[in-house]
Image (cartoon, rainbow, N blue to C red):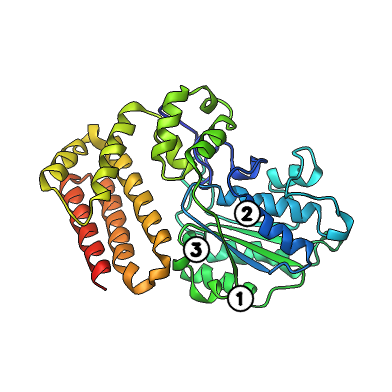
């Protein structure tokens, strides 16, 4: 299903098309264990000041972070809310309304700047944005509650903005909580990572993904259930991945690419050449986008599953993928032939995986 065009004014860099923004989602699907861990720490009065919320892209990490923020801003004192069973805050609660409007004085959200009618969203979270946003941490939170900072995501910080965030995370003011969303926690600045409690969210099951899609409202809830089920099964635990697959041709292509990726480091040159032909020219733009999205999910999942192996073994894969994404952006800007790029990507991925096996 093709997404309807969205105007630049409506586009937020951390929103997927017409789907509700994570701050507008009030249900939690599939991450009950993570919720219990946070709730137990809150009840015991042992809340760490910084949480690194990690896991693959599109599984609900930002939704979880906003859920935590709403809860802490609504219920800062466990003694005053002894009957709380989960992190739910009703949508009509004053705090929930303020968070949805990004108007709560004790909530800071660090994210890429939304687009305007003249330009698209920013590509990084700039240092000036970090400094301005974190100025709120120099004042006392309202009613003696928490001040909460959501970073969505750590991958969007550049070196300067990451170091600016680090200064506050190193010496946090009292009653401050940092919720740092990361798609690849192992790549987060080590000095930030060492000061965080890690909370890893797992992939969603296909059934969980279908439940989330059904709850997104129109147009997502009107999708043929059989198509929705196929998309959920192929999405590698990611709701965003499933939403991008709601098209018969796209599903067939993703099934084909996933099969090729699973067989790496073995590469069938004829198969890669045939795939490359599908990405050629203007007619191949959507196929190329689907190809890159599928590889991105594969690389993210591989890194996530193999984190314990250490940075040295994973570094070649990370470097190859960053190089490939840069080359893809250059090909788009300069209108280059994408076929050689597809060949290069598969060969480089195969080489990186062979290096990882040998390390």
Expressed as whole percent of the image width and height from the top left, the position of residue 103 reads 72, 48
The local crowd at label 1, few if under 14, some if 14 to 19, many if 20 or more residues have their Cα within 10 Å, is few
What distance separates the C-alpha of mark 2 from that of mark 1?
31 Å
Q: Closer to the N terminus: mark 2 or mark 1?
A: 2
Residue 146 at least partly seen:
no
Expressed as whole percent of the image width and height from the top left, the position of residue 183 reads 47, 57
Q: Residue at x 26, y 67 (%)?
A: 357
The local crowd at label 2, few if under 14, some if 14 to 19, many if 20 or more residues have their Cα within 10 Å, is few
Q: Which mark is residue 33?
A: 2
Query: Tag 3, which secondary structure?
Result: loop
Query: Tag 2, which secondary structure?
Result: helix
Expressed as whole percent of the image width and height from the top left, the position of residue 338 reads 20, 45
Query: The C terminus is located in which quarter?
Result: bottom left
Q: Is residue 35 left or right of residue 187?
A: right
Query: The N terminus is located in which quarter?
Result: top left
Q: In which image quadrant can residue 325 be found?
A: bottom left
Residue 176 at least partly seen:
yes
Q: Which mark is residue 167?
A: 1
The answer to whether the residues at label 3 and label 1 have Cβ atoms under 8 Å apart is no
Q: Residue at x 59, y 32 (%)?
A: 215
Residue underneath mark 3 = 157
What distance separates the C-alpha of mark 3 from that of mark 1?
14 Å
Q: Which mark is residue 1?
A: none
Q: In which image quadrant can residue 245 be found?
A: top left
What distance separates the C-alpha of mark 2 from that of mark 3?
28 Å
Q: Residue at x 84, y 50 (%)?
A: 83
Q: Is residue 78 above or below residue 210?
A: below
Q: Residue at x 69, y 54 (%)?
A: 68
Query: Tag 1, which secondary structure?
Result: helix
In the depicted view, which residue is nearer to us: 226 or 295? 226
């Amino acid at each position: 299903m093709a997404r309807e065009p969205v105007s630049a004014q409506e586009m937020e860099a951390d929103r997927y098309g017409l789907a509700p923004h994570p701050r507008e989602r009030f249900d939690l699907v599939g991450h009950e264990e993570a919720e219990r861990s946070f709730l137990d720490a809150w009840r015991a009065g042992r809340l760490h000041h910084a949480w690194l919320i990690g896991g693959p892209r599109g599984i609900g990490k930002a939704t979880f972070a906003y859920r935590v923020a709403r809860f802490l801003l609504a219920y800062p004192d466990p003694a005053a809310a002894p009957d709380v069973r989960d992190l739910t805050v009703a949508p009509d609660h004053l705090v929930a309304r303020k968070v949805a409007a990004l108007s709560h004085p004790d909530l800071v959200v660090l994210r890429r700047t939304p687009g305007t009618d003249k330009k698209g969203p920013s590509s990084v979270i700039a240092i000036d944005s970090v400094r301005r946003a974190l100025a709120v941490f120099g004042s006392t939170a309202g009613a003696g509650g928490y001040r909460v900072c959501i970073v969505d995501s750590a991958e969007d910080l550049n070196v300067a903005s990451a170091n600016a965030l680090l200064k506050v995370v190193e010496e946090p003011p009292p009653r401050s909580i940092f919720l740092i969303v990361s798609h690849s926690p192992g790549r987060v600045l080590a000095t930030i990572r060492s000061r965080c409690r890690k909370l890893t969210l797992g992939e969603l099951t296909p059934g969980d993904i279908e439940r989330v899609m059904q709850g997104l409202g129109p147009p997502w809830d009107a999708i043929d259930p059989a198509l929705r089920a196929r998309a959920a099964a192929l999405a590698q635990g990611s709701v965003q991945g499933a939403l991008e697959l709601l098209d018969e041709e796209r599903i067939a292509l993703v099934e084909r690419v996933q099969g090729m990726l699973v067989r790496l480091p073995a590469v069938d040159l004829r198969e890669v050449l045939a795939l490359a032909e599908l990405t050629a020219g203007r007619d191949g733009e959507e196929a190329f986008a689907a190809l890159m999205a599928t590889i991105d999910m594969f690389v993210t999942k591989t890194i996530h599953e193999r984190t314990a192996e250490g940075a040295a073994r994973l570094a070649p894969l990370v470097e190859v993928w960053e190089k490939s994404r840069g080359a893809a952006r250059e090909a788009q800007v300069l209108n280059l032939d994408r076929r050689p790029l597809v060949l290069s990507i598969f060969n480089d991925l195969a080489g990186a995986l062979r290096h990882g096996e040998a390390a």
